[in-house]
Amino acid sequence: MAQIIDGKLIAQQTRAEIAEEVAQLKTQGITPGLAVVIVGENPASQVYVRNKHKACGEVGIYSEVIAMPEQTTEEELLAKIDELNGSTEIDGILVQLPLPTHINEEHVLNAIKPDKDVDAFHPINTGKIMIGNPDFLPCTPAGVMVMLQKSGIDVCGKNCVVVGRSNIVGKPMAMLLLAANGTVTVCHSRTKDLASVTREADILVVAIGRADFITGDMIKEGAVVIDVGMNRREDGKLTGDVDFASASERAGYITPVPGGVGPMTITMLLRNTLTASALHHKR
Ligand code: NDP
């Protein structure tokens, strides 16, 4: 039976470390600040934004939620980003996705100053990750790396398989595992005989958005299984991309959903806000 990697506990520990660092900064008159911009009334986005605001408050980070109406134009949103780019109180800017369809997400994300881009979605920051010299790490993959490290799992030399190649999770995840000296394979919807690839993984990270898709027979005995997926079942319950019951019979370590990767994502946003604050006060 696999050992559970408790994301909630690791997130709590990491947030306590962040809170200490924030308290230390405050003695020097520095308060890190985050602006979270939300456009429209998507209920899921509203929950995410509330959680981010609350998490900031808990560790002493100043945060502002900027709620803009659904009919906001791209120009109006870009003007707001511009204002936040120039604010000395704001170290990090996060635009909650998805944006309403009449707004071009790429235009908006690219308008955030790279040194305030705490989601690490700006091409400058993705490029820096690619060449192994990042300022910020994208929150979800960074959270996975902290979970591995805090669970004493060494990536060096391991066969790592990432299922999913999105810009937000899969691709940066592969880069971070590579930077940690893993031997990395990336799979996607066109991969032939997926199971034969996943069965070779010492460390398997799954981010596809398909409920309970990876089953125990696709997992090598003793492997580390990280389930990034967050899917709503018909009964309203949250479930991952990995079939937990069968996978935990085979894996050595496994993350549950909920209580695995999820809590780490906001934690790494707090970490990135601290990093941004450090970048701004170095000058
Ligand atoms: P995307 O939809 O952007 O990407 C999904 C990826 O999975 C694509 O690369 C796609 O391949 C691949 N894929 C889809 N079906 C299959 C299949 N049958 N076999 C192999 N690969 C497949 O999703 P995201 O990366 O944004 O998110 C993935 C999951 O992670 C979702 O459940 C999401 O909710 C969750 N998530 C969780 C977070 C957290 O904090 N825990 C944060 C972000 C996401 P192709 O490129 O070929 O289409």
Image: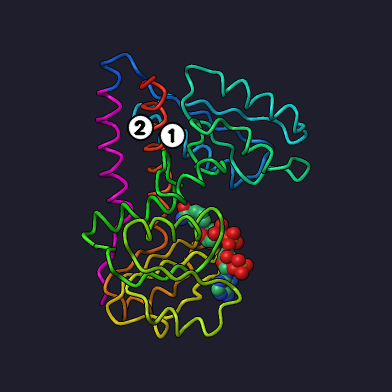
Number of marks: 2
Task: Indicate whether 122 appears above or below 150.
Answer: above
Q: Is residue 199 visible?
A: yes
- In the image: residue 95, left or right of residue 200: right
- In the image: residue 141, left or right of residue 82: left
Q: Can residue 230 be seen in this view?
A: no
Q: Residue at 25% x, 37% y: name it.
A: 17
Between 66 and 22, the residue placed more toward the observer is 22
Q: Which label number is shown at residue 54?
A: 1
Q: Which residue lies under the disc numbered 2?
A: 58
Which residues lie in the magenta part?
Answer: 1-24
Coordinates of residue 274 in the picture (x, y in percent): 37, 31
Q: On the rendering, which quadrant does ligand 1 occupy?
A: bottom right
- In the image: residue 118, left or right of residue 143: right
Q: Which label number is shown at residue 232?
A: none
Coordinates of residue 160 in the picture (x, y in percent): 37, 69
- Look at the image and say whether residue 175 sits in the magenta stretch: no
Q: Residue at 36% x, 69% y: name it.
A: 183
- Secondary structure type for disc 1: helix
Task: Indicate whether 195 appears above or below 54.
Answer: below
The reply to whether the residue tagged 2 has its Cβ within 8 angstroms of ligand 1 is no
Q: Do residues under tags 1 and 2 come within 8 Å of each other at their CB atoms?
A: yes
